[in-house]
Image (cartoon, helix red, strand yellow):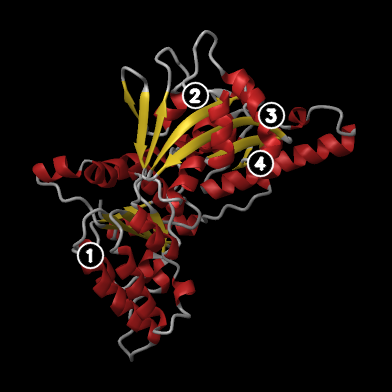
Amino acid sequence: MQPWIVRDFHLDDLDQLIDVWQDSRTSGVHPVYTLAEIIDACTNGLAVVAVTEGTVVGAVACVIHDDRAWVVTLAQAKEWREQGLGSALLAQAEARLAARGVRRISALLPAPETRVRAFRNSDYRVEEDLHYFERTIPVQPKEIGPLTQLGGRLLPHGLWDALAGMQSEKHLIEQRLILPLARAELAKSLGVSPPRSVVLFGPPGTGKTTFAKSIASRLDWPFIEVFPSRLASHPHGLAGALRQAFLDIGQLEHAVVFIDEVEEIASARTGTGTSPLQGVTNELLKIIPAFREQEGRLLICATNFIRALDKAFLRHGRFDYVIPIGPPDLVARKAIWNRYIPPAISRRVDLASLAVASDRFSPADIEFAARKASQQALEHAVHHSGGTSPGEAALTTETYLQAIEGTRATVTEAVVKDFFEDIERIARV
């Protein structure tokens, strides 16, 4: 959980921003931009600040020239360095700049400057002599309108690396999906056809949506989630709305398109008559082959009930892979628990015991149990000590085990049994 909030710069922030800028300067290194230029960027360009408890602890300011923006400062208070704050500020600035039609973001730093990790982590390219960093926003200005209309967006960098545990699933997806798409030319030269459409299946809450978003983040492609329920009110009905949505997606250079709970619009047809839902299924079966003819796009469909899908939907030629995403194993659960336990107490919590006790827990279940334990610790700190003693003392292995005991696992043993049967019968990796 990030302890800061990133928001737009306000004029009232100026004094604190200057203090942070002064605090962030490297001793003996002359800055590329003067304080006056930084102030001008804050007032006439674009600037965002990170705030914690009402205090500005970080800021990024940019000047904009046509379709290019220059970062004139990326400042962080000393006590907040090396915690991902710089990357978070750059990500928020990039999203706002993309909305203004900016295609390239550049940063010019003095050669002796060493604090450049945030730029490297945000995929900026470095030029050796001047530490010249540049990043191309993967959305052209003409695509902003269609992307906005579709409800699409660029997701923050690092979602893939932040995906705790699930190493076997991550490795499979990295090799089968991401590698051929990220290195498309090399893949083609070796006779590998980059995937165009895949199905992720597994019990509820196992992270299928998270995987889809992480894939988009890893590829640096816009993420578009198609919600059939929102398309149902279209004048031409759900089938017509679905067709139009995919036509609009065709205007984009790259896109990861995600349909969750796809069984709602691709369930097995009965053959006992035509229903509106069967018409939608038929339309989707027509859309997928046309979608697959376009490069630079990936359709990800997710389902909790793969047995409910129409047999024609999963036929070879429509989906390259049918990938199982199951409940996290012991190693993955330990990694997921570690993500939600405050760093200050992680050393005295027995993660192995929590991982064993949370068998069949999904990532969402683990997050819920961890938050429940933290809430109980907060209430104990406030009501039993008047809020004068640190609440961390109430967060122990036993506290988390009690939270686990009070949390019902989303995935039942019967669901696990069905899932492994589905892997044998339906998975295609």
Which label lies toward us, 2 or 3?
2
Residue with the mark numbered 4: 10
Q: Return the residue at label 3.
A: 16
What is the CA distance from the residue labelled 4 to the residue labelled 3?
Answer: 11 Å
- Do residues under tags 2 and 3 come within 8 Å of each other at their CB atoms? no
User: Quick one: 269 or 86, which is closer to the camera?
Assistant: 86
Earlier along the polypeptide chain: callout 2 or callout 3?
Answer: 3
Q: Which residue lies at the image location 33% right of the left edge and 90% below the top edge?
A: 272
Residue receiving disc 1? 318
Is disc 1 placed on a helix, strand or loop?
loop
Q: What is the C-alpha distance between the residues marked 1 and 2?
A: 54 Å
Which is nearer the N-term, disc 1 or disc 3?
A: 3
Circle nearer the N terminus (4, 1): 4
Q: Secondary structure at mark 2?
A: loop
Q: Locate residue 334 relative to residue 111 in the image: left or right.
A: right
Q: Which residue is at 19% across, 45% downward?
A: 184
